[in-house]
């Protein structure tokens, strides 16, 4: 069931989103050559704790996972697409890092992700990031009252198709609000004018995931959580929580 939020609820989600934005900014600032992924998780934990927020990631156990998620961020490096568990791996010059983070405060949740290079960036990685961000911007721009969910999906998928990028089959965005994952599912490909109607108060986490090799296939790592590209190509994942409003899309997860 899809819950349409009141303006007050959207404002409350903005507070959760602001914490997410601050956590992601702090993690990106702390990331550098020699820093471990576990240390980045600690940075995010500190931001959440200082704000009085909890993590919707920590202890999360969906049906596909073998164990509850043990961290407050997903940290995915190079050919890892999403859901990477932050451990003792230390970042190296040229790594491409995707960080996903959520926060819950006063019963409302925000969810967002960023991708950035560590040390000396590769030109192809910068282009991958730019195109993934472009797809997210296109999806946000399509989140207009009176439209359809397929408008968002089509906007994101069109950027991927133009650039020859793959996107992992079966994964996309989602509704969000009282919990991290709510209806409706938001595919990253679709037909315009189709699907659930976009009404003011609908809140969605939009999250294009681009695979540089152009394939949609992925494999699940030994931890049962991390998704990897099958061809070893690099991946980018960028996400914002967005509200449909009478005045246009409102991004809720900016710092």
Image: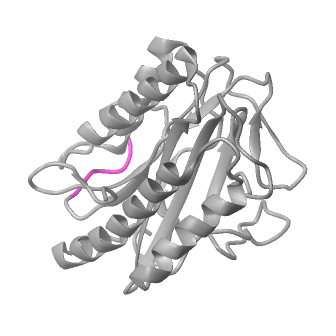
Q: Position of residue 251 (x, y in %)?
A: 27, 53
Q: Residue at x 24, y 70 (%)?
A: 10
Does the magenta stretch mainly form a helix, a strand or a loop? loop
Q: Residue at x 72, y 71 (%)?
A: 61
Which one is in front, 203 or 28?
A: 28
Is 138 above or below relative to 140? above
Color scheme of the displayed model: one colour
Q: Position of residue 156 (x, y in %)?
A: 41, 31
Name the residue furthest right.
222
Horizontal side of 150 relative to 68 (left or right) equals: left
Q: Position of residue 186 (x, y in %)?
A: 46, 47
Residue 196 painted magenta: yes
- Res 63 quadrant in image: bottom right
Q: Quadrant of the C terminus?
A: bottom left
Asked if one can make out residue 242 in the rendered structure from this viewpoint, the answer is: yes
Horizontal side of 170 relative to 202 (left or right) equals: right
Give the number of marks. 0
Which one is in front, 233 or 246?
A: 233
Q: Residue at x 38, y 69 (%)?
A: 19
Horizontal side of 39 relative to 117 (left or right) equals: right
Residue segment shown in magenta: 194-199
Q: Position of residue 254 (x, y in %)?
A: 30, 55
């Amino acid at each position: 069931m899809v819950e349409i939020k009141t303006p007050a609820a959207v404002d409350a989600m903005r507070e959760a989103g602001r914490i997410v934005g601050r956590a992601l900014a702090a993690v990106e600032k702390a990331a550098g050559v020699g820093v471990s992924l576990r240390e980045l998780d600690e940075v995010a934990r500190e931001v959440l704790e200082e704000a009085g927020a909890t993590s919707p990631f920590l202890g999360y156990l969906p049906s596909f996972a073998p164990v509850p998620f043990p961290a407050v961020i997903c940290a995915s490096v190079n050919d890892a697409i999403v859901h990477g568990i932050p451990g003792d791996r230390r970042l190296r010059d040229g790594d491409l890092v995707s960080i996903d983070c959520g926060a819950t405060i006063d019963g409302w949740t925000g969810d967002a992700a960023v991708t950035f290079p560590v040390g000396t960036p590769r030109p192809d990685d910068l282009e991958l990031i730019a195109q993934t961000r472009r797809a997210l911007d296109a999806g946000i721009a399509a989140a207009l009252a009176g439209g359809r969910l397929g408008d968002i999906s089509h906007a994101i998928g069109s950027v991927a198709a133009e650039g020859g990028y793959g996107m992992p089959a079966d994964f996309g965005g989602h509704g969000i609000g009282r919990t991290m994952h709510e209806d409706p599912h938001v595919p990253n490909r679709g037909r315009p004018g189709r699907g659930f109607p976009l009404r003011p108060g609908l809140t969605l986490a939009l999250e294009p995931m681009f695979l540089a090799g152009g394939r949609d296939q992925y494999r699940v790592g030994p931890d049962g959580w991390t998704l990897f590209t099958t061809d070893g190509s690099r991946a980018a994942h960028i996400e914002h929580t967005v509200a449909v409003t009478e005045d246009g899309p409102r991004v809720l997860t900016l710092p």
